[in-house]
Amino acid sequence: MTNPFENPDGTYLVLVNDEGQHSLWPEFVEVPAGWTTKFGPASRTECLEYVETNWTDLRPASLVKAMES
């Protein structure tokens, strides 16, 4: 059985939480509380490209805010 989170042929969503963290999520799995769909559905490759382009600062938003204070 293939892990649905690593299926190269699967259809995915890019989710984002309140901290600005991104996650690839199989389209058929319910989006968990605290996360919203930011991109997709799309191929795994397209979703990875979206994440690489749009999540350039990997620090949680709360850490960024604390460091700016």
Image (cartoon, rainbow, N blue to C red):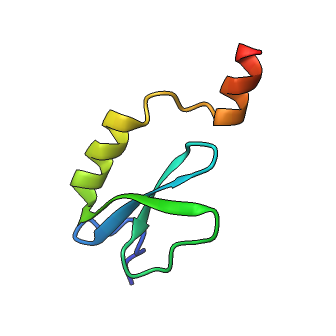
Quarter residue 58 falls in:
top right
Position of residue 9 in the picture relative to residue 26 (left or right): left
Residue at left 43%, top 36%?
55
Q: Position of residue 53 (x, y in %)?
A: 31, 34
Position of residue 31 in the picture relative to residue 41 (left or right): right
Quarter residue 33 falls in:
bottom right
Query: Who is closer to the viewer here, 6 or 16?
Result: 16
Query: Who is closer to the viewer here, 14 or 48?
Result: 14
Query: Who is closer to the viewer here, 25 or 40?
Result: 40
Q: Is residue 11 above or below residue 17?
A: below
Assign the C terminus to one quadrant of the image: top right
Q: Is residue 18 above or below residue 14?
A: above
Residue at left 70%, top 15%?
68
Q: Is residue 63 above or below residue 2?
A: above
Residue at left 73%, top 17%?
67
Residue placed farthest to the front in the image? 69
Position of residue 19 in the picture relative to residue 57 (left or right): right
Q: Position of residue 54 (x, y in %)?
A: 37, 36
Q: Is residue 62 above or below residue 42?
A: above
Q: Position of residue 11 (x, y in %)?
A: 27, 71
Residue at left 46%, top 80%?
29
Assign the N terminus to one quadrant of the image: bottom left
Q: Position of residue 19 (x, y in %)?
A: 63, 43
Tally of numbered tags? 0
